[in-house]
């Protein structure tokens, strides 16, 4: 159902954690493809991506070109997906919703963590990204396509 795009750069630990959270959704058929967008990591990030069976590209335009599904989930590599995110995304797609923000968990419970916005990814139809350009500007894409749904 989904192609997942993960922008990375020297993010081996974060990528391994995120991929681990995507595995159950892949087994259930929600995640069909993972695309790692990386401009030149010097650590083991690309090796982890290849070992996990992910497609590796260097530009956002390339990521969209290799995306095989109609819906795209763009996830920051350091996003910690909340428990139950798969059900929320699946329900949203079943209702034929528009774009949505996929909320992540906060880092810690202290005052600083509560003041900082929780990270989020973006669920958007691939066709809506056709004019996005070669570079990924996730903040601008969230504003334009995030809609009012928060999953």
Image (tube, helix red, strand yellow):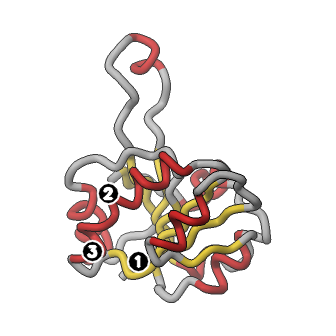
* Secondary structure category for the residue under label 2: helix
- Eye-nearest disc, 2 or 1: 2
Q: Which residue is mark 1?
A: 2
Sequence-wise, which precedes: disc 2 or disc 1? 1
Q: CA distance from mark 2 to mark 3?
A: 24 Å
Question: Residue 21 has which mark?
Answer: 2
Residue 23 percent location from the top left of the image: 30, 67
Return the x and y of residue 133 as percentages of the image width and height: 78, 71
Please name the residue shown 46% across and 78% down the image: 53
Asked if 82 appears above or below 109 in the picture, the reply is below
The residue depicted at 43 percent of the width and 69 percent of the height is: 98
Q: Earlier in the sequence, mark 2 or mark 3?
A: 2
Q: Are the residues at dot 1 and dot 3 in contact (C-beta closer than 8 Å)? A: no
The answer to whether 129 appears left or right of 28 in the picture is right
Q: CA distance from mark 1 to mark 3?
A: 15 Å
Q: In the rendered view of the protein, which quadrant contains the N terminus?
A: bottom left
């Amino acid at each position: 159902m989904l192609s997942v795009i993960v922008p990375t750069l020297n993010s081996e630990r974060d990528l391994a954690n995120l991929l681990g959270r995507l595995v159950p959704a892949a087994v259930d058929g929600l995640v069909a493809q993972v695309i790692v967008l990386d401009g030149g990591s010097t650590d083991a990030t690309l090796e982890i991506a290849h070992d996990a069976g992910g497609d590796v590209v260097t530009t956002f335009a390339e990521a969209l070109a290799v995306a095989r599904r109609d819906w795209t989930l763009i996830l920051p590599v350091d996003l910690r997906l909340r428990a139950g995110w798969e059900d929320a995304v699946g329900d949203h797609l079943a209702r034929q919703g528009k774009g949505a923000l996929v909320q992540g968990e906060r880092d810690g419970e202290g005052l600083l963590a509560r003041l900082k916005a929780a990270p989020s990814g973006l669920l958007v139809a691939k066709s809506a990204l056709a004019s996005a350009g070669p570079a990924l500007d996730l903040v601008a894409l969230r504003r334009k396509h995030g809609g009012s749904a928060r999953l």
